[in-house]
Amino acid sequence: MTEPVRGGRPIENQGRATVLVVDDSATKRYLLVSWLTRAGFVVLEAETGGEALSRLLEADADLVVLDVKLPDMSGFEVCERIKTDQRYGVLPVIHVSAHAVDVGDRTQGLNRGADAYLVEPIEPDELIATAQAVLRYYRARQRAELFAERMVRLAETTLAINSASTLPALLAAAAEGACDIFGWPAAVVAETSEGESLAAVGKPASVRRWAVPSHAVAVGSLVRSDETADWDVAEWPEGETVAVAAARLRADRPPVYVAAPGSSQTPGFPVLRQLSQAVAAAVEAQRSFDEEHRIAVTLQRSLLQSRLPDVPGVDRAVLYEPAGSQTEVGGDFYELTVLGDQLLVAIGDVAGHSLHAATVMAELRHAVRAYAVEGHPPGAVLELVNRFMRTVLPTDSATLCLLTLDPASGRIRMAGAGHLPPLVHIDGEVRFLEPRGPLLGIDAPPRTELEYTLPPGGTLVLYTDGLIERRDADIDEGMAALAACAAEVEDDLDVFCRRLLTQLAGAGEQADDIAVVALRRSA
């Protein structure tokens, strides 16, 4: 669909102008039609005001030459209806008259919307010159209005693409915006950070793999005209060419392409070029973020425990899920280490989301292991780690739950530092343990220890806040949801942990890291 432009056909498709001549005199109408036809206009005819209004609804006209005296209504009324009824668009009107020739008549005609008023007898050159002058003005006005309208839509599209959270969503927003701007389905093509070429087409946009035919594109932007066969990613109007804007910000980055029908473009392709540059800038930012996030997540995973120790008499499983691609890495961590006949278990969360938080997490995890290896019980380990943080990392804070488990007896010694309470499942019943203590990194009284015996078949679940916290819900609701989900524990603890993640975190993009540790004494 071509974009409708007020006052007839789209400016880009305007060649010979179409004029509607309205006069009930066959002789005078013949003369007007002859003069306009010889001057290169396409001419339509009507005898009455009603017929003229009907014809304007059916045909694309660029100008109306209108007699003032008509048998069914005055030309003044016809002109006024054309100018005030949105169905006719904004059409220029030239009044001609052999009877209404005095100053009052001409004044009324112009006041009621006419763009020019010619009094008969009319010279052919005067009629043609007046028609051309009126059309020049209206076409310039249409171009200015179209450009202004497209710039508004370009601004809206730029906002939409910069608000997108993923590259496919960005390309879809750009394709839909291009459709709004140019009035035809358009195609937007870019490469992901992994080198996969994606194309978004139409409104609503569909995104799929598609590679642009090879063309050399230097740094900067250009607009070229391609054949539709080269852009079979979309269906183009018959007989069209494709206007393709390519923008490349860096020599080591692939270009971004925006393609639209050639007939939808104005001279110089100003809006198409600006749209391609806006898309290229947004794609570059998204691609850089994706690369940085992937590196950060890889680093974060490398800092976490890669292999769990084998502990006779204890089934164990861990799950770690980083936050969505648009969130920086966090400081969630876990630790399972065998110390003599005891299993040391820790789970914690460093405040903040950044690469710094991930590095603090690594230091904290190593400090916990080091102090535990020295033989300190959980409460003493927390005090030593707190002293370490206040000395070495004075601006950071973290929560931590630390315990030792005797696999033979099930005896647990546990201490907490502001972390969420662990959950215990025994014979279908669920409860929360509550080791109390302030978070790490602040000057606070010593953390107390809690002792508990986990019976055979009992399951202990430790987790970070990303599993249960939601911005739109109280944390008590999240803990109640966790208790409900943990009312049943699968034989396979990995399956159990994955179900907790699926049911509690949902299908959407999660806003925080999630770590879960599940331990079960063998029956």
Image (spheres, rainbow, N blue to C red):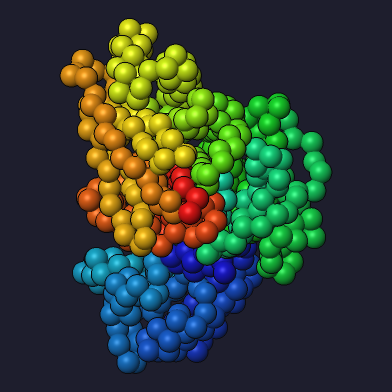
Q: Is residue 300 visible?
A: no
Relative vertical location of residue 197 with respect to residue 64 in this rendering, above or below:
above
Q: Residue at x 50, y 29 (%)?
A: 341
Q: Residue at x 42, y 17 (%)?
A: 375
Q: Residue at x 37, y 86 (%)?
A: 49
- The part of the image, by quadrant, that contains residue 18 is bottom right
Between residues 385 and 455, which one lies in front from this camera angle?
455
Looking at the image, residue 519 sits to the left or right of residue 252; the answer is left
Q: Residue furthest front?
A: 409
Relative vertical location of residue 213 with respect to residue 356 in this rendering, above or below:
below
Between residues 482 and 452, which one lies in front from this camera angle?
452
Q: Residue furthest left?
A: 445
Query: Residue 410 location, x and y as percent?
Result: 40, 41
Query: Residue 294 location, x and y as percent?
Result: 58, 34
Looking at the image, residue 498 sits to the left or right of residue 352; the answer is right
- Total number of numbered labels? 0
Query: Residue 87 location, x and y as percent?
Result: 38, 76
Between residues 226 and 188, which one lies in front from this camera angle?
188
Relative vertical location of residue 462 with respect to residue 497 in this rendering, above or below:
above
Q: Is residue 370 visible?
A: yes
Between residues 74 and 488, which one lies in front from this camera angle?
488
